[in-house]
Image: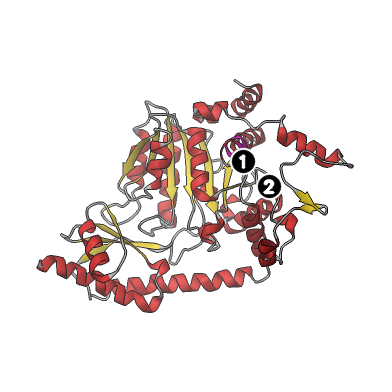
Amino acid sequence: MNSLAAQLNESISAGNRHVYDMLSNLGREIYFPKEGILSQSAEAASQAKRYNATIGIATEGGGPMHLGVIQDKLSAYAPKDLYPYAPPAGKPELRSAWRTKMLKENPSLEGKSISTPIITNALTHGLSIVADLFVDAGDAVIYPDKNWENYELTFGIRRHGEAVNYPLFTEDMKFNAAGLREALLNQKDKGKAVVILNFPNNPTGYTPGAAEGEEIVSAIKDAAEAGINVVAVTDDAYFGLFFEDSLQESLFGKLADLHPRVLAVKIDGATKEEFVWGFRVGFITYASQDAGVLTALEQKTLGIIRATISSGSHPSQTFVLEALNSPEFEAQKQEKFVIMKGRANKVKFLLDSGKYDGAWDYYPFNSGYFMCLKLKGISAESLRVHLLQAYGLGTIALGEYDLRIAFSCIEEQHLEDLFDLVYQGIQDLQSS
């Protein structure tokens, strides 16, 4: 094992032995090199006053070389903020700005010890880092039966983790904290579990209420007190799009410093929060009462980044930073929130109108981009194909009877027509 990796492992073990035990084999072996091209380039940047022949970019006229056909379109930005490599951890100013935003929007983080967010290539990359650091073959990865299918690829196919699912909802359509607790406690023999908490949930668009949130935290604490090491990951992809009376902040704040056997990890990003999907700017943040643990986890995260993408997109980080610092940012974001809430409310009004009685039920939704129909006696896949072929309407079939509809990408005035077509498609299939 590399001596730097060993030193990081010693820091984690000294600060919290349980966190060390959570690491995968790769997580224990990975490190961020202190010597080599990056460190030598950094040393030269501060001392090479005559010529700096270390950096792997081309320069011209004292700045990064660039093409006019690109810069002409981006003339509002200085070439130094676009073309050079961003640091592996991301632009320091953006990391700081995101941390400030996170603390403001999550009051439960007050007084908690968290790392400065590290910039990832959006949320999938952040989840992949978690998988690399903490999942070995056979490790339990716990998430509900209604989930984003990429979890299977990220944690199962890539890292051979064992998916442990539980029903998302109880019979009275509340979050199934008892199911989560049971799934966790069933891992006592393994002594370890990774839990994915995705709110607003994809595909249902559900965020628990405050009481349900406390039950989730209690279930994780019960597992920790039973001797199970828990990596508690909040996938906050759709954070902030809370339209009704639900949790208004991430559970990361409640999970941070919950128990020595619980490592809270927050995955979030500008991707959906700030409506910049193609920019691919995400963040990963850790919570620990021990500063040495946080530092070591940051270094191991940088090792994963260095070994995979090297660093994220510099232009995208610059664009997001400029937006966050703009005096118009909050007002413009609120305008988009109102539009999204209007669409969600219109969907709920239509579904509760009685117009489609007998065709489906729907799962609770109060946030995010999606809602999910529970079809009655009609195959979701058959309906999906029929709607696409007969009416040019695209939907997502999940399981046998669930049909996901993204109201986020449908203008409010078209929503009734959309659900009328879904209803007509069901009638077509029933009559045939």
Q: Name the residue nearer the viewer: 217 or 85.
A: 85
Q: Could you say whether the residue bearing mark 1 is in a helix, strand or loop?
A: loop
Residue topped by disc 1 = 310
Residue pictured at 20% horizontal, 72% vertical: 424
> Does the segment drawn in magenta span residue 90?
no
Where, quadrant-wise, is the N terminus in this rendering? top right
Marks 2 and 1: in contact by CB < 8 Å?
Answer: yes
Residue tagged 2 = 85
Is 304 in the magenta? Answer: yes
- Disc 2 residue crowd, few under 14, some 14–19, many 20+, Cα 10 Å: some
104 vs 271, nearest the viewer: 271
Over which residues does the magenta segment extend? 302-306
Q: Earlier in the sequence, mark 1 or mark 2?
A: 2
The residue furthest left is: 432
Amino acid type shown at disc 2: Tyr
Which of 61 and 388 lies nearest the eye of the viewer?
61
Q: Residue furthest right?
A: 50
183 left or right, relative to 97: left
